Image (cartoon, coloured by chain):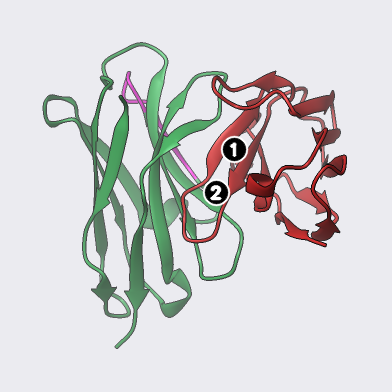
Chain colours: A red, B green
Amino acid sequence: DIQLTQSPSFLSASVGDRVTITCRASQDISTYLAWYQQKPGKAPNLLIYGASTLQSGVPSRFSGSGSGTEFTLTISSLQPEDFATYYCQQLNSYLRGLTFGGGTKVEIK
Amino acid sequence: QITLKESGPTLVKPTQTLTLTCTFSGFSLSTSGVGVGWIRQPPGKPLEWLALIYWDDDKRYSPSLNSRLTITKDTSKNQVVLTMTNMDPVDTGTYYCARRVVFKGFDPWGQGTLVTVSS
């Protein structure tokens, strides 16, 4: 399997803060990476695909970057509705599983 | 509007076979580039991709669960069915289905269905 390591696993931040989450892949996945947001008791919601393409309807304060093995999700100004858990997922290789990262929980400071 | 909904048993016994159905609307699984996948999430744990079927009947499975999974589609009924054999308590969790478009991620997702494996 391709392993995805997210860091940090937990972060505490305030409304208005700039937040960056990192996702590292165990091998080169080009830009075949997606980011999701999941709120408690709810299904995940796609934020970004292709490492940097914003899904339709997602606020522009969310952005993604990276290629190869290192990727980041940035929230430029954290809003109250952004407190959630964020997951990355590699979409490069079925043979190695469309694996998800371990998640990053963003909580209110 | 695209919607997906999972259905199936909420409780299964160890060693039994789980059958889940995803019923969707707002898109067709005969459209080129479209697929439907299954993802699960044990309580308090991360997401795990299970299986995916495409418009052309191409099927993909998680390498670690490949021997236990079967995914099929019924395009006329707008349904995708996942079967998982030899269920174990570690398979307890919420099972989601979601649409996948080639080169994109999974979007949207169903609400999920909680499956508990216990004797």
Res. B36 image quadrant: top left
- Residue A28 location (% of width, % of height): 82, 30
Question: Magenta region: which residues?
Answer: B54-61
The numbered mark 2 sits on a residue in which chain? B
**Viewer-closest of A23 and B18:** A23
**Viewer-closest of B46 and A2:** B46
Image position of A50 (left or right of B65): right
Give the residue at x 84% y 55%: A13
Q: Residues within 10 Å of mark 1 (few under 14, many from 20)?
A: few
- Residue A16 location (% of width, % of height): 83, 42
Q: Is residue B119 visible?
A: yes
Q: Which residue is mark 2?
A: B63
Q: Is residue A95 above or below residue B117?
A: above
- Residue A79 location (% of width, % of height): 72, 43
Asked which secondary structure carries label 2, the reply is loop
- Quadrant where the C terminus of chain A is found in the figure: bottom right
Image position of B78 (left or right of B50): left
Disc 1 + disc 2, Cβ < 8 Å: yes
Residue type indicated by callout 1: Leu
Q: Which residue is mark 1?
A: A95
Q: Residues within 10 Å of mark 2 (few under 14, many from 20)?
A: some
Residue type indicated by callout 2: Pro
